Structures are given as structure tokens and as C-alpha cells.
Amino acid sequence: MAKPSEELIDLARATVAAEAEATSTPYTKESWAPWIAAAETFQAAVTAEAEATEQDRIKLEMAAKAAVLHPEPEGD
């Protein structure tokens, strides 16, 4: 299984937050710009990290998104 860095997980978290903000109001190009920028930054970081760590790019992206969207419960 791919192991994303904390930085990559933070970028995925920022993208999800920007998406929530953008989709909470009616569409305008300006209101969606932060989401698009965050997504572009995240995608570039996934590619760079996959190349640097020799991990499968798709698996790395999926692992980062899963860490944000479906976090594992904290241990006792």
C-alpha cells in the first residue's frame, strides 16, 4: 500500500476544505478558483512525491484522499 507524506495529506485536506467552501454557494468562477488552485497544487505534489519515492502515483493519490476522507480511528 502507498504511504503518503503528512504534507501530501495536508494538501488533500486543504483541497477537500476548498471544495466544501466552493460548493456551499452558487457557482462563480471566482468562488471556485481556490478549489481549482488547491486541486492543482495537490495533483502536482502527488506526481512529485510519487516520482521521488518511486510509489505508484494513483495508489499514492488514493491513499492520501483516503486518509482525509476515511481516517482511521485514533487508538486508545
Image (cartoon, rainbow, N blue to C red):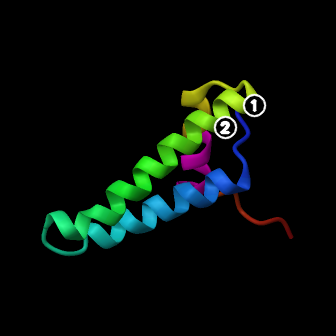
Q: Which mark is residue 49?
A: 2
Residue 25 appears left or right of 73: left
Q: Residues within 10 Å of mark 2 (few under 14, many from 20)?
A: many
Q: What residue type is labelled 2?
A: Glu
Q: In this view of the protein, which residue sits in the foreground, 14 or 72?
A: 14
Q: Find the distance from the CA under tag 2 to the CA under tag 1.
A: 6 Å
Whether residues under marks 2 and 1 lie with C-beta atoms below 8 angstroms apart, the answer is yes
Instruction: Tell me the magenta residue range.
Output: 63-70
Which residue is depicted at the point 72% across and 31% down? 52
Picture quadrant where residue 22 is located:
bottom left
Residue 51 appears left or right of 40: right
Q: Residues within 10 Å of mark 1 (few under 14, many from 20)?
A: few
Residue 30 placement (x, y as % from top left): 20, 68
The vertical placement of 37 against 40, above or below, is below
Q: Residue 53 carries which label?
A: 1
Q: What residue type is labelled 1?
A: Thr
Residue 16 placement (x, y as % from top left): 44, 61
Residue 41 appears left or right of 72: left
Which residue is depicted at the point 72% across and 55% down? 6
Q: Main structural element of the magenta stretch: helix, strand or loop?
A: helix
Whether the magenta-drawn stretch holds residue 64 is answered as yes
Quadrant of image for the N terminus: top right
Residue 32 appears left or right of 2: left
The vertical placement of 28 against 64, above or below, is below
Q: In this view of the protein, which residue sits in the foreground, 46 or 76?
A: 46
Q: How many marks?
A: 2
The vertical placement of 15 against 1, above or below, is below
Residue 73 placement (x, y as % from top left): 71, 62
Picture quadrant where residue 4 is located:
top right
* Residue lying at the far right of the rendered structure: 76
Which residue is depicted at the point 53% across and 55% down? 12
